[in-house]
């Protein structure tokens, strides 16, 4: 199981949000490059970097900073946030970004997203789907800053992308994101069972090493860890040994 330390960028600083709320942002590091270097020194081989300003404005805002981290630290990076155009994708790939995260556009414009997966290769992308469990335990898609809940569910949209040879899916249970209350183990267990050929990335709620062990046991491909590391619930070195 891969571990992705998370760096969320807002106004050039590393922050964490509570349940995606921009008004509840805690600044943990003013120098993201130094933070990325620290993660690498602790054993990380890859980073998960989200441009929160870009996600809010609909276009990349912290792109130069992300590319500086890639250049100066020399570590594998998957990044997302406001990536909505061919030119942005091409630039990121040209500068050595390893995986590009597509979120809202994968829901709003699947035809365009499928074209990009076909042209650049499905392995270069991670489709990110935020979900909210309904009363019947169905994972419904949410978007637009988690304000819009769709009738389409997670299983339906992944089915729709099967023709693209989809490789990577990041799934976040928004009711647990940033809460340290534990991940939705049952959700990820269903993901792995329904789509065994896809590498799933778990995000949201992890706060103990035991949570990581449980995710590893059900064969989740990767886990995104943010607040638990910043709040020193466990060290990155410890997480990497799970």
Image (cartoon, grey):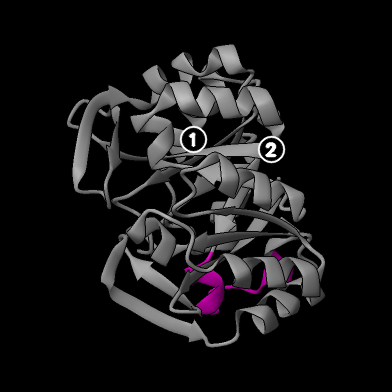
Task: Look at mark 2 in the image and give the residue it sits on.
Answer: 124
Judged left or right of residue 204, residue 127 is right
Q: Earlier in the sequence, mark 1 or mark 2?
A: 2
Q: Which mark is residue 188?
A: 1
Q: Considering the numbered disc 2 on the image, is that residue within a helix, a strand or a loop?
A: helix
Quadrant in the picture for residue 129: top left
Residue 150: image x %, image y %? 22, 30
Q: Residue at the location (38% across, 41% down)?
A: 104
Note whether 167 is above or below 12 in the view shown.
above
Q: Label 1, label 2: how many angstroms apart (C-alpha)?
A: 22 Å
Q: Out of 180 and 96, give the one closest to the viewer.
A: 96
Q: Out of 72 and 43, give the one closest to the viewer.
A: 72
Judged left or right of residue 158, residue 218 is right
Residue 63: image x %, image y %? 57, 64
Q: Residue at the location (59% across, 29% down)?
A: 116
Q: How many marks do you count on the picture?
A: 2
Quadrant in the picture for residue 4: bottom right
Note whether 21 is above or below 111 in the view shown.
below
Tag in front: 1 or 2: 2
Q: Considering the numbered disc 1 on the image, is that residue within a helix, a strand or a loop?
A: helix
> How many residues crowd around disc 2 within 10 Å: few (fewer than 14), some, or many (20 or more)?
some
Q: Residue at the location (64% across, 18% down)?
A: 165
Quadrant in the picture for residue 148: top left
Note whether 30 is above or below 90 in the view shown.
below
Q: Which residues are magenta?
A: 226-238
Residue 44: image x %, image y %? 76, 64
Q: Which mark is residue 16?
A: none
CB contact under 8 Å: marks 1 and 2: no
């Amino acid at each position: 199981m891969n571990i992705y330390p998370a760096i969320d960028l807002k106004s050039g600083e590393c922050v964490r949000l509570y349940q995606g709320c921009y008004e509840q942002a805690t600044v943990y590091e003013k120098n993201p490059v130094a933070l990325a270097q620290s993660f690498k020194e602790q054993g990380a081989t890859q980073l998960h970097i989200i441009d929160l300003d870009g996600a809010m404005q609909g276009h990349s805002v912290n792109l130069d900073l992300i590319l500086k981290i890639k250049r100066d630290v020399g570590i594998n990076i998957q990044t997302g946030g406001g990536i909505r155009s061919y030119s942005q994708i091409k630039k990121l790939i040209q500068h050595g970004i390893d995986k590009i995260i597509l979120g809202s556009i994968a829901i709003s414009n699947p035809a365009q997203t499928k074209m990009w997966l076909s042209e650049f290769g499905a392995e270069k992308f991670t489709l990110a789907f935020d979900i909210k469990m309904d009363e019947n335990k169905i994972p419904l898609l949410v978007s637009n800053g988690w304000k819009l809940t769709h009738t389409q569910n997670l299983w339906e949209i992944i089915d729709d992308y099967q023709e693209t040879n989809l490789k990577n899916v990041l799934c976040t249970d928004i009711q647990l994101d940033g809460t340290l209350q534990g991940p939705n183990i049952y959700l990820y267990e269903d993901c792995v069972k329904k789509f065994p050929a896809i590498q799933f990335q778990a995000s949201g709620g992890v706060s103990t090493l035991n949570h990581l062990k449980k995710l590893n046991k059900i064969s989740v491909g990767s886990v995104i860890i943010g607040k638990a590391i910043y709040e020193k619930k466990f060290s990155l070195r410890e997480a990497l040994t799970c």
